[in-house]
Amino acid sequence: MTSVVLEFSGGLELLVDGKKRLEQEVPDKLTLGGLIGWIRSNLIKERHELFSQGQRIRPGVLVLINDVDWELEGKETYNLSSGDCISFISTLHGG
Amino acid sequence: MKSPWGELQELKGASTAQEEENGVRQAFSNDVLERYSRQMLLLRFGVEGQKRLSQKSVLVIGAGGLGCPAAMYLASAGVGRLGLLDRGDSVDRSNLHRQIGHTDASVGADKCLSLRDSLMRINPGSSICTLSTGITAKFALQLILPFDIVLDCTDNVESRYIISDACAALRKPLVSGSAIGFEGQLSVYCDSEESPCYRCIFPSPPPPDCVGSCDTAGVLGPVPGVIGTMQAVEALKLAAEIEGAEVCSRRMVLYDGLSCETRVIRLRSRSKTCRACGNPEDSSQRIVNPAEFDYGSFTLAGSCATPQSTDQGRLRATALLDKGRLKDALCIDVRPKEQFDMCSIGGFQNIPITKLSKELITIQNRVGDKEIILICRRGVDSATAVSMMRKAGIENATDVIGGLDAWRQECNPEFPTY
């Protein structure tokens, strides 16, 4: 197993019992797309569509790999390493 | 096309005093020197910063929780011209805990005019123009064109795309803020060649049912205050062209008031294939003018909401006046606990919709052949709850059309508004 830190904010934490930060063991050799599918199946109990469609994150969620926009790191194809911090941030619209 | 703002006077800049009057040489009039002295004392700001600021115009879109503090700081600092744009909402008492430019005396007044009055009280020399129309795709370019810097202080997805697309088309710096609950976000778009627009970062809108609002999800008043104030800081850096200042572009500030944590994350650069500020492969996809783009369909795409059921079999609020019926039924209010605790109809028990699926078996065992009456704030969640129950085999459930809002309007005007 690989040990990673998962962060949820902007309301996404409500999908994982209000937890904003999880230290989590996940299967080895996952890509980030694979991780999204794994989270959907293993951590999220209901309203799965608010997180992703399969391995595709829903629009309006920023994904960060160690505090950097995943767009700069290969998005779903990024290979997870032990100790990585992956953040899922829903954008806010209120004002 | 004629500007929706009408004829705007040329920006004169802060009044400069005559040189060498009575043997005194001064950069500005006494009033200006005194009013803005504390920011002019700043090493990187000085007299030149004040001059530049007084020759710039800033448009604040949204006169709410973000727009109030942002506009108050900008007017206080002596921005040359301030534009206020809001969709014509009037001030509501439930706005006052966060929209600090409005007062109890202005409840019911137009938000733009109420905020303008506050700004004029702070700085009577301000030049402020207002339009109570909101940003619309049709006039977006004309509304933004006369201004040097734009602040997005709105509260909805559609406006955010319209404003960003217009700023991308005109290459106007856009200071974008948002807040809800205990959290806020801030970023600056379109301020340089490499700087992305909002659409570069979010090419597709979120499904509408994923979008919370302060109205339903709640918000801690100072949280939009923090973000609106940071928007003013960014706008002042841009307007005064403060030397060495680094604008929050290609970055996003995430503020979490609950944990008191602030993070700054690094964002991608401008996207070459962005529909608003790049060159998409299919050039017909390029948005040149927001007036030609259908924002309604765009932001509704991807909705995972179930289509609204018909009102057949649902109750009018007036049915709740039948006390005997209520007594015999199992009455469930599916709003969040926080709302139920504020006010509810006697005889209703609270099972929030988020907890309903876990309770279905208990309900089924308890209800027998009793009727189940469900209610919520506006009649949307209660309809969803009815269909959840039907799927679980509970047939005798119904709900109230229009929810507690309808109950207040049709039966009991004393029921609190919140």
Image (tube, coloured by chain):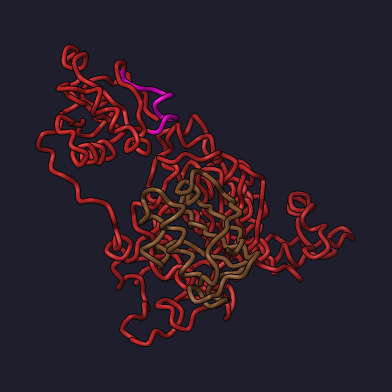
Chain colours: A brown, B red
**Residue at x-position 52% and y-position 38%:** B102
Q: Is residue B6 visible from the viewing direction of this image?
A: no
**Residue at x-position 42% and y-position 46%:** B213
Q: Is residue B72 above or below residue B2?
A: above
Q: Is residue B240 visible from the viewing direction of this image?
A: yes
The image quarter in which residue B366 lies: top left
Q: Is residue B202 above or below residue A47?
A: below
Q: Position of residue B146 (x, y in %)?
A: 49, 68
Q: Nearer the viewer, residue B351 or B413?
A: B351
**Residue at x-position 69% and y-position 65%:** B240
Q: Position of residue B120 (x, y in %)?
A: 58, 45
The image quarter in which residue B164 lies: bottom left
Q: Nearer the viewer, residue B336 or A26?
A: A26
Span colored in magenta: B336-345
Q: Nearer the viewer, residue B328 or B88?
A: B328
Is residue B264 left or right of B103 when viewed as pictured? right
**Residue at x-position 57% and y-position 81%:** B193
The image quarter in which residue B383 lies: top left
Q: Main secondary structure of the magenta part?
A: helix
In the image, farthest residue toward the right: B23
Is residue B52 left or right of B215 when viewed as pictured? right
